[in-house]
Image: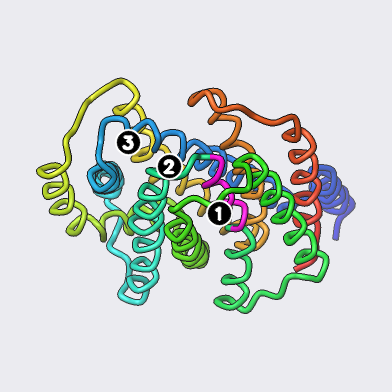
Amino acid sequence: MTAHNSATRSRTVAVSSSSGGPATRTARSGTLLAALGVTAFSLTFPATAWGLEGFGPWSLVAVRSVLAALVAGAALLVLRIPVPSRRHWAGLAVVGGGVVLGFPMLTTLALQTSTTSHAAVVVGLLPLTTAALSALRTGARPSRAFWLAALAGAAVVIAFTVQQSGGALSTGDLYLFGALLVCAAGYTEGGRLAREMPGWQVIGWALVLCLPLAVPAAAVALSFEPVHLTAHSVTGLLWVAIGSQFLGLVVWYRGMAEIGVSKASQIQLAQPLLTLFWSVALLGEHLSPAAPLAAVGVLVCIAVTQRART
């Protein structure tokens, strides 16, 4: 090796070390993308509450699925994305059933009787459920420190959100716990598929796969449920369709592919607190003085899970 080549190699190693290396950059990128997805998801419940001001629950879910599928389908068509191989369709069906149809339908039904702060209890349990399902599905084995921090974070979120709702259980709890299970399954399968194809294609094809069900469901629901178009209802519909159902899931699945399902799921511990913030800002709900303490506790737990060895 010449002196020139040796010097060049040394400079390359130095630059790579100073920038943290490819693995570090990927971890940072994945964390940022997952955090953007969580921010988009945190607006889902307030936006759903707005949407319910003008749409019935079945109409809202069906129309949001149709709109999101049209946007995703247009993107797939314009970019000439090939149809996924046959081995991916079962996983895409799980994603569609979980995050395209199941979670939106169950949470929308629950929000007819539950407040957004009470519904946030379920979101607080979602990271732990997703991590558990991921461990079963993919064979991942997070460390003991990871599980302890995840459990602690879930406990903080549950205690805070239950205190916010006065400790009362709403009649929509069965819907909410059902939503928890189907969404965790959809996240786990979507995160696995996002390692084999771009994340936006995962949710894009899942939406298109659900379109034959969503279109007739929307037609039937709109014929039975009255519609009152207002600024709130239209804004809420557009956000849950495009922001939560498509764009949010695009960055979320990409983030999970880069840092892993278990670690990405723990960033979602911040989602209930963000939802409560939006509930105050957009819906006029009142926030207790315990919010800053809960926020600090959750952020500490997130930091531990992100550093824990898997």
User: What amino acid is found at the position of numbered circle 1 in the picture?
Assistant: Val
Let me know if residue 118 is in the magenta part: yes
Q: What numbered label is drawn on residue 191?
A: none
Which kind of residue does numbered mark 2 sit on?
Answer: Ser
What SS does tag 2 mark?
Answer: helix
Looking at the picture, how far across and down is residue 99, in whole percent? 41, 56
Q: Residue at x 57, y 71 (%)?
A: 133
Q: Which image quadrant for residue 139?
A: bottom right
Amino acid identity at mark 3:
Leu
Instruction: Where is residue 189? Give x, y as percent.
Output: 47, 67
Q: Is residue 273 left or right of residue 62?
A: right
The residue that disc 1 covers is 122
Q: Are marks 2 and 3 in contact (CB under 8 Å)?
A: no
Q: Secondary structure at mark 3?
A: loop
With respect to residue 63, does 6 lie above or below? below
Q: Is residue 196 visible?
A: no
Determine which residue is flagged by label 2: 244
